[in-house]
Amino acid sequence: MTDVVVYGATACGVTAAAAAHAAGARSVLVEPSTHVGGMVSGGLSWTDVGDTRVLGGLCRRFYQAVADHYGAPLWEVKGPEPHVAERLLEAMLEGVDVRLGTAELPDAAVIVDASYEGDAMAAAGVPFAVGRESRDLHGERWAGRQPAYRPSRHNFSVIIDPFAEDGSLLPGIREPELDEHGWPAERLGEGDGALQAYGYRVCLTHGDERLPFEPPEGYDEREFELLRRYLDATGDGRPLGLVHDLLPNAKCDVNSSGPVSLNVLDGSNREYLDGDREAVREHHGRYTKGLLFFLAERGLLDGWGFPPDEFDGELPHQLYVREGRRLVGEHVLTEHDLIGARPQEDVVALGSYNIDVREVERTWRHLPEYHRTPAVFNEGYLSVAVPPYPIPYRSLTPRRADAENLLVPLCLSASHVAFASVRMEPTLMLLGQAAGTAAAQAARRGVAVQDVDVAALQDELRGAEAVLAA
């Protein structure tokens, strides 16, 4: 039996395992895939960091290692190349028993679930939430279904007909629920369990060694009729928003920019957590390759291609699972905790990035002016500014009646809205360090995770250069 087992070699899992080891615990890191780093080494290179003043401890140490690697000041490099990130994260695991390619957990005094999905938590039978809740559940202004027509750079600025000539919906558009008059129902503020969009965050290059874009098997350009209509209507010459030299060595990390992007908005990610995950990954991968090929065929990706030294010139190994399950624990973090920066006596990390809910689905609405005109819209996007806010230890712990040997720093106890800020990788690294340190203490003292000496935990974290006050 070991002291601490961490499930999930995400960046959060890396800092959890490294922190537990540094605190004297025998720690094992278990990862079903064959890679370390999750999204940090899986395509998410240009990282949203928020207020860098709150990023201390192992998180800051990692980004200092990034800066040192490139001979640059701290925070100047927008993000490491994926293969560099993986190498630097592996270096943080010295002394940790790392087991890749397996989901089997050894016996341990404390389990830390650092997966994007919350699989260890679910296997333990601990209560969790999935997707959007209603406004009424926590009294959150920004909860629930949103107006599909909200203007943003992620929505359509022109009217695009959602229907094909035969009256069917174009591919990639989710059929809305209709009201008694045949109008798509808004149901604003209602909870529907829907998830933020998933996608592959690809790494491209304009270097001389770039590899061409190839179509996926069975490619049919008619699957991208919506994109064709959008390009024809707008003349958009940079639909993916590619930026030269965003990353070192002539590379660019492609985010979900614009109304038609790398995000898959057909609702297929709702089948991911409890369905056929490989099928969902394949569906997203096929869409991504098809999108890139469609744009390349039209000259909109001229000079760009896949870098041969990243992911073997292919898509990243990690699907961007923006949210999975969320613990229902001792304290559910909500938008009120964030926007008001409510004090937390048991603070173990600070968050600071916007409440950032990416698009949830692509649907359509009738425009009532003059004619009953159908138009395509993306629904769900939100960006709400927050100050630096404390995250309590109680949001990492299940309720005592549910489990006493489990900590959940990634799929922590938070509402859908609050998690949309916490989910940023640097914040998750902070929470991983807190969970690993707490797990080591619980294992050493032989106590439940709810009985960890929080004051001592905070002292340990400060001693490791964590920032616990803005």
Image: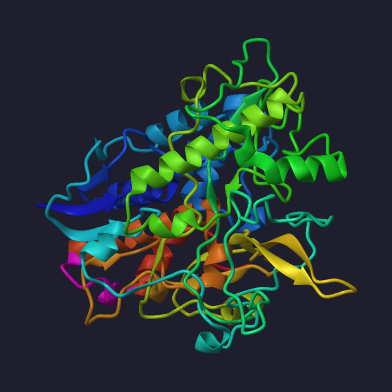
| Colour scheme | rainbow
Residue 31, image quadrant: top left
- Residue at the extreme top of the image, as rendered: 208
- Provide residue 81's location: percent of width, then percent of height: 57, 29
- Residue at the extreme left of the image, as rendered: 1
Q: Residue at x 57, y 72 (%)?
A: 417
Based on the picture, tell me whether residue 148 belongs to the magenta stretch: no
Based on the picture, tell me whether residue 446 belongs to the magenta stretch: yes
* Rendered view: 133 above or below 111: below
Q: Nearer the viewer, residue 18 or 130?
A: 130
- Provide residue 146's location: percent of width, then percent of height: 66, 73
- Provide residue 371's location: percent of width, then percent of height: 86, 71
Q: Nearer the viewer, residue 54 or 33?
A: 33
Residue 80, can we see it?
Answer: no
Task: Indicate left or right for 70 with 107 as reference.
Answer: right
Q: Quadrant of the C terminus?
A: bottom right
- Provide residue 323's location: percent of width, then percent of height: 47, 59
Task: Indicate left or right for 66 with 397 as reference.
Answer: right
Task: Indicate left or right for 53 with 332 as reference.
Answer: right
Q: Residue at x 18, y 67 (%)?
A: 445
Q: Nearer the viewer, residue 287 or 62?
A: 287
Residue 245, image quadrant: top right
The span picked out in magenta is 445-453
Residue 295, can we see it?
Answer: yes
Q: Nearer the viewer, residue 350 or 297?
A: 297
